[in-house]
Image (cartoon, rainbow, N blue to C red):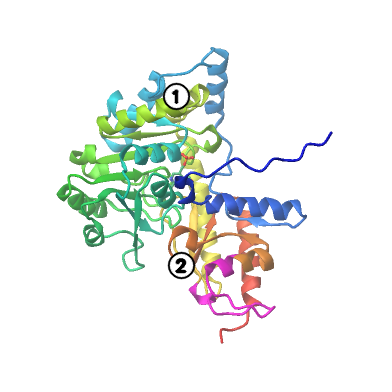
Amino acid sequence: MSVAASTSAFRPAARLQRIKPSPSTLAAQRVRELKASGRSILDLTVGEPDFDTPQHVKDAAVAAIAAGETKYTPVNGTPALRQAIREHALRTLGVEYPDAEITVGGGGKQVIFLALMASVDEGDEVIVPAPYWVSYPDMVRANGGVPVIVETTADAGYKITPDALRAAITPRTRWLILNTPGNPTGVVYTEAELAALAEVVAENPGLLVMSDEIYSEISYTSARAASLVQVAPHLKNQVLVVNGVSKSYAMTGWRLGYALGDPALVAAINTLQSQTSSCPSSISQAAAAAALSGPQDFVAETVAEYRRRRDVAVARLAAIDGLSPLTPDGAFYVYVDCSGLIGRRTAAGAVLADDQDVTLHLLEDAGVAVIQGSAYGQSPFFRISIATDLGTIEAAADAIADAVARLGEAD
Ligand code: PLP
């Protein structure tokens, strides 16, 4: 007997209608489809390390399973993980975070979402400097807030300036989201720049700063990117430091992130956590504790490799007429200004009107998948990921150069 599918009883909630799926997830889906249809695609969309998780971290997870650490843990994480986080923060930020100031979750992404959920009321404003990580505006909207996008300029190194921050603050402002090293630009704020922003934060005691430091260890300027709380420890209760093990330790699939800050905010996040996932995976917590407290050679080795790839990618893309890549100081992306391609014609006669067109052209004509700048709130750009092997990066640069050479001049 065949049963006809019933019509859907699902009625999307209003909050769902405010947001859209992550463009990077959509791009990854498109690449999978093209590959499944037999096309060979050089994929530069991925936002995760191509390296495997370090062996001692995997061993710690296996040992946790063998020891029966397979049950719910405290909402704010196992004592071992909290100790590892506390010691890591003291070592890297020079700031003490007692247990009541530490929360853990299923990735930095979940912690950011819950922090917004805990603090943003309908109509509250969240300042998001552009270019931004794709998820911030939608996470704000999903929680009833209003993202206030502040475009940055090439002159200011694509960083928000104290004046721009001051001008964006209103009585409804709850948060500034600061991402350093930044995705997609690779921008790293210097200590002096952070100190100047800290003055504005201090002038506004009702302002919170979400300091997203998920790429903190992946820095090409110094051993580690500076943090706002490091340069202004007196603002500890206004700054929520968000970090995790995904990027620095190649542990994206383990889903483990954490945040450090005001105990009242941390307690609120823990309450939400207790009513959503109860706690992150006990196994992942054991692995993360090993990553944070164990040997750090993996970080140094992978950062050296990213730096090699960065240098090649930037040099190769800069040599292509019409493209100007930003040289990232951290993270593992290169943000490429493609304004020189806007207005040019494809062999089929279509005009490249914006960075979405450029991205589609690179996918169709060069077989190279990148993500359009409009997804990050600043155009015309596209983002490539260098979390892929050097051979793929070189082949992609060659294919992009050929595809650009086939374009006709602008009218
Ligand atoms: N913040 C930024 C800027 C990111 O790019 C990402 C991941 O792409 C995250 C946070 C979230 O990382 P995770 O949830 O894996 O910890």
Q: Is residue 373 magenta?
A: no
Residue displayed at 56% across by 87% down = 411
Residue displayed at 33% across by 46% down = 122
* Majority SS type along the magenta span: loop
What type is the residue that disc 2 sits on? Ser
249 displayed left or right of 235: right
- Is residue 405 visible in this depiction of the protein? yes
223 displayed left or right of 342: left
The residue beneath circle 2 is 379
Query: Which is more toward the observer, 121 or 56?
Result: 121
* C-alpha span from label 2 to label 1: 40 Å
Q: Is mark 2 within 8 Å of ligand 1?
A: no
What type is the residue that disc 1 sits on? Ser
Q: Secondary structure at mark 1?
A: loop
Q: Is residue 341 magenta?
A: yes
359 displayed left or right of 135: right
Decide: few, some or many residues near mark 1? Use Cα within 10 Å; few <14, some 14-19, many ≥20: some
- Is residue 227 visible in this depiction of the protein? no
Residue displayed at 25% across by 61% down = 164
Decide: few, some or many residues near mark 2? Use Cα within 10 Å; few <14, some 14-19, many ≥20: some
Q: Indicate the position of residue 314 as horizontal and vertical percent values.
A: 51, 63
Q: Give the magenta-colored segment's residue range.
A: 339-359
Q: Secondary structure at mark 2?
A: loop
Residue farthest top in this picture: 67
166 displayed left or right of 281: left
Labelled disc at residue 278: 1
Residue farthest bottom in this picture: 411
Q: Is residue 60 above or below residue 49?
A: above
Q: Is residue 84 above or below residue 16?
A: above
Q: Indicate the position of residue 84 as horizontal and vertical percent values.
A: 38, 26
Q: Indicate the position of residue 281 as horizontal and vertical percent values.
A: 50, 25
